[in-house]
Amino acid sequence: MPIKTSDATCDEGSTARQAQVDRAKWLALLARATRDELDNAIACCPTAPEFIWLRAPQTGLVMVQGRVGGSGDRFNLGETTVTRCTLRQQDGVVGTGYVLGRDAERAVRVARLDALMQMPQHRAVLAAGALTAISQRLAATAAQNDADTAASRVEFFTMVREA
């Protein structure tokens, strides 16, 4: 049983942790969304405030790590291109966008939506509409990939020769 110092402190800490987990989830979805999906999501929020750049879109390299067998020791697999940006809306909310590749416009859209998702009045609309659609498309793609992989599976067996 966890030790509590005060209920208020634990509630604030767990709320902050949950907010971080929620933000990580929506950023992961937005980073894998297509440009059209991001445009449709932004169109759901016509009253979005203006923004200024804290970090204009930049493209660079990051090291990608893999694991032996998917769960073993880490190793450096290679480098990949990533585009990032950070913006601040007029109301002070900061949004960050990271996407694989060199598509600066996608990174801008992800940052814009990240900032909008932090605003309660936009979060419900975006979560129920655009993020659900993106999540469903990604799940359908993963299911199709799993089915394609299963269809090409080969079962090997060994015959025992009697002496």
Image (tube, rainbow, N blue to C red):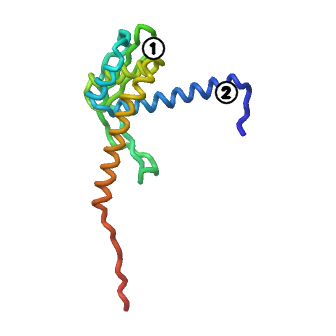
Q: Which mark is residue 10?
A: 2
10 Å crowding of disc 2: few (<14), some (14-19), many (20+): few
Rendered-image quadrant of the C terminus:
bottom left
Residue 31 relative to residue 72: left or right: left
Residue beneath label 1, please?
93
Name the residue nearer the viewer: 152 or 77.
Answer: 152
Q: Residue at x 35, y 34 (%)?
A: 134
Q: Residue at x 72, y 40 (%)?
A: 1
Q: Residue at x 73, y 30 (%)?
A: 4
Give x and y (percent) for residue 115: 41, 18
Indicate which disc, 1 or 2, sits on the residue closer to the N terminus: 2
In the image, is residue 26 above or below residue 87? below
Name the residue nearer the viewer: 43 or 26.
Answer: 43
Q: In what element is the residue under mark 1?
A: loop
Residue 104 relative to residue 10: left or right: left
Give x and y (percent) for residue 48: 37, 13
C-alpha gap between disc 1 and disc 2 = 25 Å
Q: In the figure, residue 65 lies in which quadrant?
A: top left
Q: Amino acid at mark 2?
A: Cys
Q: Residue at x 46, y 30 (%)?
A: 24
Q: In the figure, residue 122 lies in which quadrant?
A: top left
Name the residue nearer the viewer: 83 or 37.
Answer: 37
